[in-house]
Every structure is written in structure tokens, then in C-alpha cells.
Image (cartoon, rainbow, N blue to C red):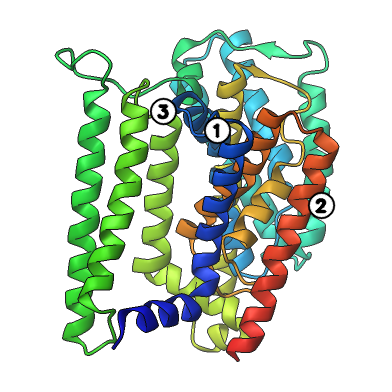
Amino acid sequence: MNLGKELGGLVKKNIRDYMMYIALVIIMIIFQIFTHGGFLQARNITNLINQAGYVAILAIGMTLILILKHIDLSVGYVAGFCGAIAAILMTQHGVNEWLAILIVLAVGLAIGMYQGLLVTRLGVPAFVTTLAGMFIFRGLLNISLQKTGTIIVPNKVFNALSNGYIFDLPFAPEGIHLVTLVIGVVAVVLLWISQIKARINRKKYDFKVVSLPIFIGGLILASAVIMLIIITLARYQGIPWTAVIVGVVLIIYNFILNKTKLGRYIYGIGGNDQAAELSGVNVKMVTLFAFASMSVLAALSGILYTSRLQSATPTAGTAFEMDAIASSYIGGVAVSGGIGRVTNTIIGALVIVSLTNGMNLMGVDISYQYVVKGIIFIIAVAFDVISRKKAK
């Protein structure tokens, strides 16, 4: 088969998955031009990663909720409230940073269990439950900071979570973060090994695979992008801890969705909850897990946001849920449920944060920023709906 025709057919068949990557590249090129090269500078890429961290964490959890055809509107203020709890524990009660983080994650779990039980046991619609939660946790956030106002967090270890960088070796050459380079090389090697192994397995079971030139070309392109980002970061201060935290969460949830029964149940329930229940799937327990998981990730998001600002504020959490939902849908989660991948959701989060970051660099008024993000969001969802109708 002609390589051009094969490549064109591949893009056409997987246009929904590729579109978000194309959109991200276009957005980056546009902002790189209009900011006169400032957008892709090492300092701004690092800032972009730290900005995207708390949104990406929320979006990963939201992906599971949306696949199940539910929604969680409370996550923004759950994040803000949990961040305030962390700040209060450390500054007013002298609690160790790591213990404070564990306590806050436990609070997030309790919130998720409470909301999940309302949805699964009492049958209260998720929209109503989490809308009420939005009001409740916004109020609790304001109450917790009513006497003190904004709380400045002086704890260096805590603040390093969203402002610090991974360690480097003492003998590393000046101007180059050696550990970052090693991680990049290891990531590329693992990418090649995993993709080659997956290709061999697909051929073993007679599944269709792309031609060898396109397969190798795709791996070379992906490796080049990874190493370009890695080299840029290595010439600055290295990989931010935010990227490590998001990476760990992404790996865990990608494994859950793709390699476990729980993941298959989540997709099955999202596709047809009645059929899943008739097949013996405990729909209520799986849904409860998704809500509990969402609130734990909201707590983690609040920790990262508080760490990034080095303070807890009464406005923390405002519109976080909107960015998380938009990231998930831009990342390819189906409006009808049952379809979505957390790896694509991360790209959706990068699209949303890149728009904000780039327009901030250009000095675009916040009002116009909301308009632009809204337009991008509706285009992404409309494209998804139309393309899925055509596929049927």
C-alpha cells in the first residue's frame, strides 16, 4: 500500500484522537509567533507544567466520572477547601508537611465517599449532589479563612511540590541537569520497548498493524518531541516535581483503566449501565469508587495549587471544575459516556492551560480569554459529536 494513502487513512480513521494533538501544536506555534519566541522558552515551559499540574490531576479524576455518564461540579471548591486545611494544619497547628498532606487526602476521601453514597445509595442525581457540594465547600472554604484571610505557607518542602525541581547529581556538568537527561533517555527507550512489544502481540493474534515505515516514523517523531522537551528543561533547572506527581497519577489511572477489571467495568457501565449490571457488575460500588477517587484527586489538586501560590486564599478553586470538564471533553471523552482515555485528557489539560498561558503572555484581557476558551470547548465537543455520528 502507498505510504501516503495509508497515512491519510490512518489519520482519517483516528481523527478524534489526533485532533487534540494537532490543536495543541497549532496553539503552541501561534503563541510562539505572537510572543516573539517567548512561549516555548524553558522558563515558560516550566511555568506551563506547573500551571497545568492541578488542572491535569482534576481532569484525570473527572475522566472517570464522565465515562460513567456522571459529573462532579464540586471539585473546584473541594480543592480550595482541602488546600486551606493543609495551610491551617501547617501554619496554625505545626503539623508536619507530609502528615498534613495525608490528612488532607483522607479528608478528600471522606468527601468523595459522602457524595458517592448520596448518588449510589440514595439515588440523588450526581448533578444535584455535586452542585450542593459546590455551595457547601465554597462556604466551608470561606469559613475556614474568615478570621485569617489569606494564609501564607512558609514550609519549604510543601512549597517545593509545585515550585521545586528534581535533584541532580553532584558531578553533573554546569548548565545541564543530568538526571533530567537520563530520565528522558529512559523514557524514550521504554517507549520503543512498549510499542515494539505491543506490535508483536498484535501481529501474534492477527490484529491489523500499520506498516513498518509508519510505525518507525511515528516512534522517531514521538522520541524527538520527548527529547526536545527534556533537553529544554535540562538546560534550565530540570523536571519540576509537579510533572513527576502528575506522571505518577497518570500511570496509576492509565493502568487501572486499561489493565484491570475495574477499568473494564468503568467502560462497560459508561457504555450501558443496565447491561453491565445484568452481567454481574456492581455498578454502585464502581460508581462510589469513581466519586471517592475524584475527591482524593481534588484534594491533591488543592495541595498543588496551594503549594504553587505558597498560600491558601478564599478564591482558590474558582472555576477549576470547568477547566477539568473542558480538558476531559477536549481530550476525547464522549458526551454519551463509555469512551475516554486519561492520556488524552492530559493533552486536553495542556490545550486549556496553553490557551490561558499564551493569552496572558500576550496581555489579552481575562474576559476575552473566557470567550476564546468557550469557543475552543464547543468546537471540540461539536467535532466529537459529529465525527461519532459519521462513524455510525
> At 38% across and 43% down in the image, what residue appears?
248
Res. 125 mark: none
* Quadrant housing the C terminus: bottom right
Neighbor class of circle 2 (other Cα within 10 Å; few <14, some 14-19, many 20+) is: some
Residue annotated with mark 3 = 240
- Helix, strand, or loop for circle 3? loop
Residue annotated with mark 2 = 131
Q: Position of residue 71 (x, y in %)?
A: 70, 60
Q: Nearer the viewer, mark 3 or mark 2?
A: 3
Q: CA distance from mark 3 to mark 2?
A: 34 Å
Tell me which numbered mark, 3 or 1, is placed earlier along the sequence.
1
Q: CA distance from mark 3 to mark 1?
A: 17 Å
- Helix, strand, or loop for circle 2? helix
Q: Looking at the picture, which amino acid does disc 3 mark? A: Pro
Is residue 338 toward the left or the right of residue 96 in the image?
right
Q: Position of residue 150 (x, y in %)?
A: 74, 14
Is residue 153 toward the left or the right of residue 219 in the image?
right
- Helix, strand, or loop for circle 1? loop
* Quadrant housing the N terminus: bottom left
Q: Nearer the viewer, residue 184 or 361?
A: 361
Image quarter of residue 385 = bottom right
Q: Are marks 1 and 2 in contact (CB under 8 Å)?
A: no
Q: Position of residue 38 (x, y in %)?
A: 55, 28
Q: Looking at the picture, which amino acid does disc 1 mark? A: Phe
Q: Nearer the viewer, mark 3 or mark 1?
A: 1
Q: Nearer the viewer, residue 391 or 159?
A: 391
Q: CA distance from mark 1 to mark 2?
A: 36 Å
Q: Is residue 355 above or below residue 308?
A: below
Asked whether residue 60 appears in the rendered view, the answer is no
Q: Looking at the picture, which amino acid does disc 2 mark? A: Leu
Residue annotated with mark 1 = 39
Asked whether residue 380 appears in the rendered view, the answer is yes
